[in-house]
Image (cartoon, rainbow, N blue to C red):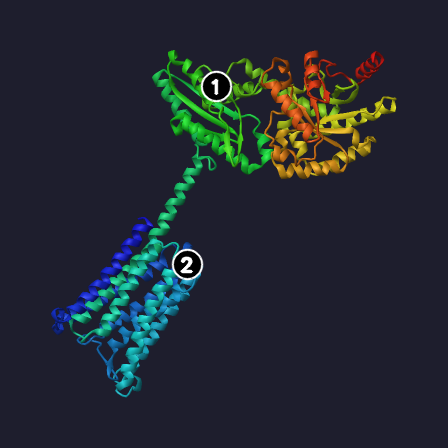
Amino acid sequence: MSANRAEKITMCTAIAAVIGFLFMRGFHSELYWTIPKKVYLFIHSSMEFSGFAVSFTMLVLGWLFFAKSLSKHRLYTAALFGAVGVFDLLHGLTTEGMPFYRSVGETTLSALFAMTAQLIGSVGLFFIFSKNDAPVAARKRLPAVVVSLGSAVLVSVLYYALAGLSAVPVLTGESLGTLETLVRFIILFSYLSTLGMLLYLNRNERPQALLTIIQALVFFLVANVQFMLGSGIQDSDMLFGHLYRLIGYYFLMKGIYYVTLEEPFKQQKRTEARINYLAYHDELTGLSNRRLLQEQLDAELRRAQLSNSQLAVFLLDIDRFKTFNDALGHSFGDQMLQAVSERLRLAAGKRSHVYRMGGDEFVVLMPNIMEQEKEQVESKAKALMGLFDAPFVLGEAEYHITISLGISFFPQDGESVEVLLKNADTAMYNAKMHRNEFSSYEPEMNRKSHDRLRLESDLRRAIEQEQFTLAYQPLVNLSNGKVVGVEALVRWHHPKRGLLPPGEFIPLTEENGLILPLGEWVLKAACKQNVAWQSAGMPPMMMSVNLSMRQFRQHQLAERIKSILDQTGMQPRYLELEITESMTSDVEFACETLASLKEIGVKISIDDFGTGYSSLISLKRFPIDKLKIDRSFVGDLTQGGSDAAIVSTITSMAKNLKLKVTAEGVENDEQIKFLRERNCEEAQGYYFTKPIPANLFENWYKHRNQLA
């Protein structure tokens, strides 16, 4: 039942109780009658024994069930109504006409028991609900119940000791009337106070159990008003009062039932459902997880065998997701994964056919493919790739991502869940070598996958044995033609494969963390070479070294670089560190890191500028010295297209920001002429020379100077 509906029912119940009471008072003379003694005795005894039964039920519910989730409200309410039940039972047994009827002063035992039951019930509820509910140890059940029932028994024994005495001052004459009025006032005040307190303390949220207890308090309140206004003992006024009180007992027991049984049971069912859900679904994205994928894919394979159909497994991975995660933080990465999963869910049609394998890997199933429908698989792959053409808007920025996708087919690429997923993963890694592509599995790919594993093993050995070397590409000043610096580029002398370019091993080092020791080796080797050139008489020139994302986020990066400069004896002003735009996405972190690097005296340049997501607002905050225009804009520079406009804009912007500009990938005279006209200070590329080893660079440099 919704909270809103439960509140409406509670309000209607309370209004009905008040209207019923007002109706009886308004038509009192018509509704009033005296009940024959035997009839009244039967009805009254039935009601009192019912009240005792309800009280005993509350005691059992609150004491015996769900002991591990016992709370103060539940325990103390159960103990309280255990005592109330005792007094109700004794009230019924000592009524006039019953075997234990006794008089005390000018009243009776029955009246004393009735007043005591109502008094401790009202005051007890007030004190119980005035305290915050909290868990209580199961061992406290027995003491609470023993104290409650023991106190009730002691009071009952005291009342019986007074039975037959006519000279009890407080129970005779005006004292008796004053006592009855005071007790009635305390009862009414307690119920009203409890009602107001519960409504105030739970003004924001009112659970079902609380609303039911409020209904009970309304009926208790009306019942006691009815008792106060009643005309006699054996009449309709007292009958209606007992009826209201019995209804109040019912609602109170119902409230205790909700708290004690129904709510814990519902909570247990919700917990079980949640556990079962999490066992088969990814908590972050809500997609089915790897466990459910394996079960459902196994079922789909059996169906495909029976129907003689095929099945395609699409396994996709977000390109450069680790870069996003490292640069912008895991919270951003989670948002990205949620956004990606939502697009996949909408595109796949059936939610049950989209799965998150873990990390940034997702699987989409395409079952029931007939032989003549295989071209639909390629269309489906293109559609999945196309999902990521539009940027993702996260926060106040747009982010473009691409995916790499691998496809395996049942039965030709495997007849089991494990083999199909493994082969789809192999195809995905084959596509990932080019990024933003999809690839179907071919047996040849396994060899490439094994080669990749061997290469990773060789990499670790290569770092230990320093099998790497550096090649250098000059940076030339376009105004005077002088060489003003070099960029150090790493190469790997593999003992069996020969000289490997960075593209064949750098991505691997970034994935497995080997980029950190390799990057440190490159930096140290480049600094040593620069110092060696200066010692050999070559003029000082800038040495540019690329930093990886992991290096940039490395703890105490500035201190590490300063230590290398001190070890090699290279002056900081001749070292230029190149970072990419993606490293600066976390603006505050980038500003802090770049500032610490500038403090040691090195230069900072942004490499591949124009391909990332730098904003001009954040760019002007960075303590950088140079922008390097990506080669993708330089290639078609002289064709008069958008690339020319982009390069012109970058050089103009850099000039206003007092930054140098270097153009990468320069290959012909037309490009040189265009760049000079746009006031681009430096250039590098095959127009001058490809990256060459240190000894060849020395010869090239001397030869160039002789020609100059």
Left or right placement of residue 337 versus residue 501 in this view? left
Q: Is residue 165 visible?
A: no
The three-letter code of the residue at mark 1 reads Ile
Per the image, the residue denoted by label 2 is 71
Image location of residue 622, percent across then percent down: 67, 35
Q: Is residue 36 above or below residue 568?
A: below
In the rendered image, the quadrant that contains the C terminus is: top right
Within 10 Å of disc 1 (Cα), the crowding (few <14, some 14-19, many 20+) is many
Q: CA distance from mark 1 to mark 2?
A: 56 Å
Tell which circle, 1 or 2, labels the residue nearer the N-terminal end.
2
Image location of residue 591, percent across then percent down: 66, 38
Q: Quadrant of residue 33?
A: bottom left
Within 10 Å of disc 2 (Cα), the crowding (few <14, some 14-19, many 20+) is some
Q: Is residue 335 above or below residue 201?
A: above
Q: Quadrant of residue 220?
A: bottom left
Per the image, the residue denoted by label 1 is 407
